[in-house]
């Protein structure tokens, strides 16, 4: 409520919130998972994402982290391409004109990247223009290992976090404006390096040793 007094709701939401579903990729050695847990300085992960159960607009995204700095690039991927990937047909990407789709194809072919887990949650986002600040609150984080049902609204999921757990994430360019810093400092929270991908894999039970 304090944040609403200084920041604006993200216009992409419906009633200030939206649903997010992502399909994360990893290889048979769990490279992305292990690099995240070990805090590897240079790492990346691929995911396919859509919002509010609307599969008319799906994006492939690559998130990278180098020296603590994050970067994300994305490209449109079609429903047909996603359906073929879910069947294991990676050749559907090989003639794409999108460089990111070609990169995923190459890494699926040579590094054995494969769909690993579905991550669902509800996001409440706020933005503050100065510093390009974006603050998000994620709740009801759920996981699914029914990869073939990624595009289905009836995909079964299981909780990946304790009831009432909320993740607050603060993103900004160079400096965090003092008005935002003072606002979020009043929140009773535990600061930590968190990954919804790791949380959802662990929901399987005993996955992370």
Image (cartoon, rainbow, N blue to C red):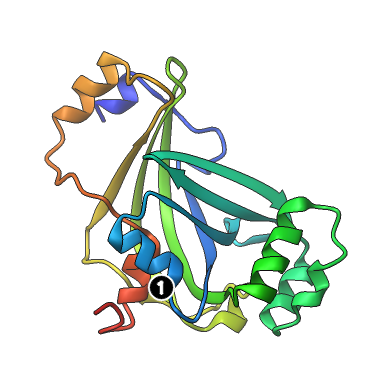
Residue 119: give x, y in percent of width and height: 45, 66
Residue highlighted by disc 1: 143
Q: Residues within 10 Å of mark 1 (few under 14, many from 20)?
A: many
Q: Quadrant of the C terminus?
A: bottom left
Number of numbered labels in the structure image: 1
Q: Quadrant of the N terminus?
A: top left
Up the image or down, 53 lies above or below 177; here it is below
Image side of residue 37 versus residue 24, left or right: left
User: Which residue is rendered at x = 78% and y = 62% of the image?
Assistant: 78
Up the image or down, 92 lies above or below 70; here it is below
Residue 59: give x, y in percent of width and height: 67, 54
Image side of residue 12 versus residue 133, left or right: right
Up the image or down, 74 lies above or below 131; here it is below
Q: Nearer the viewer, residue 98 or 178?
A: 98
User: Which residue is rendered at x = 72% and y = 68% of the image?
Assistant: 105
Q: Nearer the viewer, residue 152 or 63?
A: 63
Image side of residue 44 versus residue 170, left or right: right
Q: Nearer the viewer, residue 95 or 14?
A: 95
Question: Where, by quadrant of the figure, is residue 90 drawn?
Answer: bottom right
Residue 151: give x, y in percent of width and height: 64, 72
Question: Where, by quadrant of the figure, is residue 6 drawn?
Answer: top left
User: Which residue is rendered at x = 76% and y = 78% of the image?
Assistant: 84
Residue 137: give x, y in percent of width and height: 34, 44
Q: Nearer the viewer, residue 100 or 7?
A: 100
- Secondary element at image label 1: strand
């Amino acid at each position: 409520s304090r944040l609403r007094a200084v920041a604006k709701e993200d216009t992409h939401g419906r009633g200030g919130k939206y649903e997010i579903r992502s399909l994360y990729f990893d290889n048979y050695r769990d490279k992305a998972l292990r690099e995240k847990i070990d805090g590897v300085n240079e790492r990346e992960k691929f995911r396919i994402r859509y919002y509010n159960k609307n599969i008319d607009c799906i994006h492939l995204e690559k998130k990278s982290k180098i020296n603590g700095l994050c970067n994300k690039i994305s490209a449109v991927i079609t429903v047909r391409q996603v359906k073929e990937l879910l069947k294991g047909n990676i050749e559907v990407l090989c003639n794409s004109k999108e460089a990111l789709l070609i990169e995923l194809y190459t890494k699926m072919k040579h590094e054995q990247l494969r769909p690993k887990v579905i991550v669902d949650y509800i996001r409440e986002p706020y933005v503050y223009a100065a510093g390009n600040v974006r603050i998000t609150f994620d709740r009801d984080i759920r996981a699914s290992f029914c990869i073939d049902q990624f595009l289905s609204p009836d995909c079964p999921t299981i909780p990946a976090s304790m009831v009432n757990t909320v993740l607050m994430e603060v993103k900004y360019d160079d400096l965090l404006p003092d008005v935002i810093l003072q606002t979020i400092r009043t929140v009773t929270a535990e600061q930590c390096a968190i990954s919804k991908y790791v949380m959802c894999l662990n929901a399987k039970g005993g996955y992370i040793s």
